[in-house]
Amino acid sequence: MKVLIIDDDPTFLMMLKNFLSKKDFIARTGITASDALHILKRESFDIILLDFKLPDKNGIELLHEIKKLNYTAPIILMTSYADIKMAVQAIKLGAYDYVSKPVNTDELLNIIQQALAKNVDKEKKEKTTSFNYLTGDSEAAKGVNQHISLVAPTNFSVIIQGESGTGKEYVARMIHLQSERKNMPFVAIDCGALSKELAGSELFGHVKGSFTGAMNDKVGQFEAANKGTLFLDEIGNLSYEIQVKLLRALQERKIKRIGSNSDLEVDVRIIAATNEDLKEAVERGDFREDLYHRINEFSINISPLRDRKKDIMVFANHFLQSANQELKKNITGFDAEVKDKLLNYQWPGNIRELKNLIKRSVLLAADQEINKDCLPQEILANSNHQMFSSTNGENASDLKAIAEKNEREIILKTLEKAGYNKSKAARMMNIDRKTLYNKLKLYGLE
């Protein structure tokens, strides 16, 4: 278990850290509210202990700031007798409990254990409606968060655009959780995984006997998401016929199950995601223009991880802590060479690739820090120097050209490993088949 302790008394701080370390807690410390916010933006914790009076903020002010980070870990305040009234107010704002100073360590440990047990139960109950969304520090990440805050309270349909693995579903969930529909269903559908034959049934439902294999009535995802949010991932994969039905559902707020003559009224907010340019799909005739304009009331673009260098170590440290908890390890960080490799890699799989790599590295790590022996070959072989030298006279400052060259090579290698089975290769790269076909066309590999 990981605990963050914030107190401006160094002696007390070290005493408490030593006590909790002996109780098998991994303790991180700070002495100001600024320390707390800086650490919480980069790491996740199971419990947070805060001194009520800090040099730069009091407990109420800091609690407000932590809530903005969407932190779900229980917060326990440590306060003097004179501040108990304010501590009670803090509990009303979301703090779990408070302890009076001088702190009785056995009493504090008991409260911590109660808080952790209660939080586990709470997370199980709220698993489908809340989660810890990690934000980055880059200007691009701040821009995305600003757009989420602006559009969430509205009823706008939203298109989220970004490469595979950039976190489009997380952004969609954040919009839902900050909207007035937050207590209603959030239903996510991967349109890339829907066959042409079953897409209509999955979205709109069917009645018994409407087609071969329809043994019972089926509730479609539109009905399941009624009053809530329907997230359509990789919407560009939907067939033209389904696009027509989707447009009707959005315009008339009604759906019809396959095989039924009755309309059902639905109130659903649509959030769509795509890793391709839908404008180009419209121009090619692959996507209906009227549907595009209907769902594109607001758009959010998520930059690829290679363009957000400032976020790489923020995410890496977060995934490190998650992997430590899952794998029951205590890896403290990354050595300098590994940090350099992570920062200089192009991340074609974006955040998803980074998360998988960190988890694998934690599993392999034999020392306290992750070193280069834990990294896969593609990371070791892709330092900036090697990438620039591989361009053979091309503009070494053209990051887009370099990224595309590396992506092309990765696709070729993956196809070879998959025996040129495109469906298998797409699964290995965590992308859908249509995305792979588009990239094959883009790079002249058809």
Image: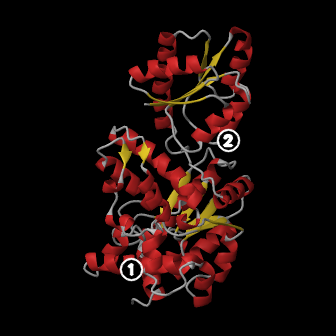
**Upstream in the sequence, badge 1 or badge 2?**
2
Which residue does the image show at 54% across and 33% down from the upper left? 73
Which residue does the image show at 51% across and 68% down from the upper left? 260
The residue lying toward the viewer, choosing from 390 and 137, is 390
Q: Nearer the viewer, mark 1 or mark 2?
A: 1
Image position of 276 with respect to 223: above or below: below
Residue tagged 1: 409
Amino acid on which disc 2 is placed? Lys
As drawn, the label of residue 68 is 2
Q: What element carries label 1?
A: helix
The residue lying toward the viewer, choosing from 210 and 290, is 290
Local packing at callout 1 (Cα closer than 10 Å; few below 14, some 14-19, many 20+) is few
Q: How many labels does the image show?
A: 2
Which residue does the image show at 53% across and 66% down from the upper left? 306
Q: In this view, does 415 lie to the left or right of 200?
A: left
Q: Where is residue 99 in the image (x, y as percent from the top left)?
A: 60, 14
Q: Position of residue 362 (x, y in %)?
A: 35, 47
Q: How far apart are marks 1 and 2 (CA)?
A: 41 Å
